[in-house]
Image (cartoon, rainbow, N blue to C red):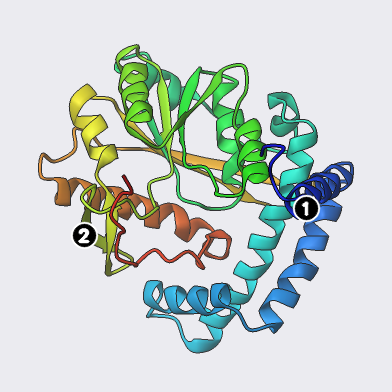
Amino acid sequence: MTSSSPLSTRLGTWFAKAVFACLGVLPLTFLRSLGTGAGLLLWALPGGYKRRAILNIAIAFPELNETERQHIARDAMRHVCQMFLEMPYWWRDWSSARVAAHTQPINWALADQLLAKGKGLILLSPHLGSYELLGSLFSARHPSTVLFKPPRVAWLRDFIKSLRTLDQLKVVPADASGVRALVKTLLRGQTVGLLPDQVPVKGEGEWVPFFGQDAYTMRLVHRLQAMTGAPVIMLCVVRQPGETLCKMEYWEVPTPWPEDPVAALTLMNQNLERAIRLAPAQYLWGYNRYRKPNQRKT
């Protein structure tokens, strides 16, 4: 944001930061309670996010009856609000120790063994649960580089980037320079992280099944694995009730992946589905996952 920005924009940015700062001093349990209330309100009101969430849940879980799908959709509204209200809490103190204090103990043996092979490690996660915590949790143990697709809103872009930038966590943009940085990181035997359930631009993906319906899926992960031979881990952080508020789950996705990108990305999406099924209501169902891709702007 520059000094030439409209006064209303500057005031809006200041107000948003002030609200975040005030929310950040509140206990995490209280913020989640606020998220529950906001989610109930979001569910009661009409809106595009709600409509898309209901539609995508129906696609993903045709075996469930209408009541069961409505229950997941209603809970999804609660969790998306909790996700946004958690952000100020982490913004105030984004230290690995603080994040770990809210997370069940993690057995890192598998990740350590895979990194010891010297080919680097590719971490994948869906937009599920408290996914913003993944970088802090993993980079506290091993240096990591993550791909970052910034929001359009300047203050929110800077805020989220600050959340994802730590002593051992490097953030790179979702462009050609960022991809080169990911390759170099893997060739150094270190870790990269991606959220591969976003729709890539036209020409950079393949149409492969995601919960039974074709979704345009990024080819980048397959390219990185083929170029470096790096092992792949799927991981996620899901919210928990009680004093321990988060739990991380992870497992290895078998490699080498098939040479055919469609087969490889089908395998990746199957593992994304496995992660989402751990806590279906905590996924961002309102995202337009099945849309057609847009051409990259030049």
Which sits earlier in the primary sequence, circle 2 or circle 1? Answer: 1
- Amino acid at dot 1: Gly
The residue depicted at 38 percent of the width and 29 percent of the height is 178
Residue 183, image x and y in percent? 30, 22
Residue 191 in picture, x, y percent from top left:
42, 23
- Would you identify the image quadrant in which residue 37 lies? bottom right
Looking at the picture, tell me which residue is in the foreground, 125 or 2: 2
What x and y, as percent, mark residue 17?
A: 79, 44
Label 2: how many Cα within 10 Å (few below 14, some 14–19, many 20+): some
Query: Could you tell me if residue 119 is visible in this image?
Result: yes
- In the rendered image, residue 58, in percent from the top left (x then y), is placed at 42, 79
Which quadrant of the rendered structure holds the N terminus? top right
Report the mark closest to the observer, 2 or 1.
1
The answer to whether one can see residue 244 in this image is no
- Which amino acid lies under the numbered mark 2 shown in the image of this protein? Trp
- Which labelled disc corresponds to residue 207? 2
Residue in the image at 89% along x and 46% along y: 22
Would residue 103 be found to the left or right of residue 186 on screen? right
Quadrant containing the C terminus is top left
Q: Are marks 2 and 1 in contact (CB under 8 Å)?
A: no
Please rate how many residues cluster around mark 1, counting C-alpha atoms within 10 Å: few if below 14, some from 14 to 19, many from 20: few
Q: Which residue is mark 1?
A: 12
Depicted 56 relative to depicted 191: above or below: below
Rounded to the nearest angstrom, the CA distance separating label 2 from label 1 is: 40 Å
Q: For numbered disc 1, what is the local secondary structure?
A: helix
Q: Going 69% across and 75% down the picture, which residue do you hit?
A: 42
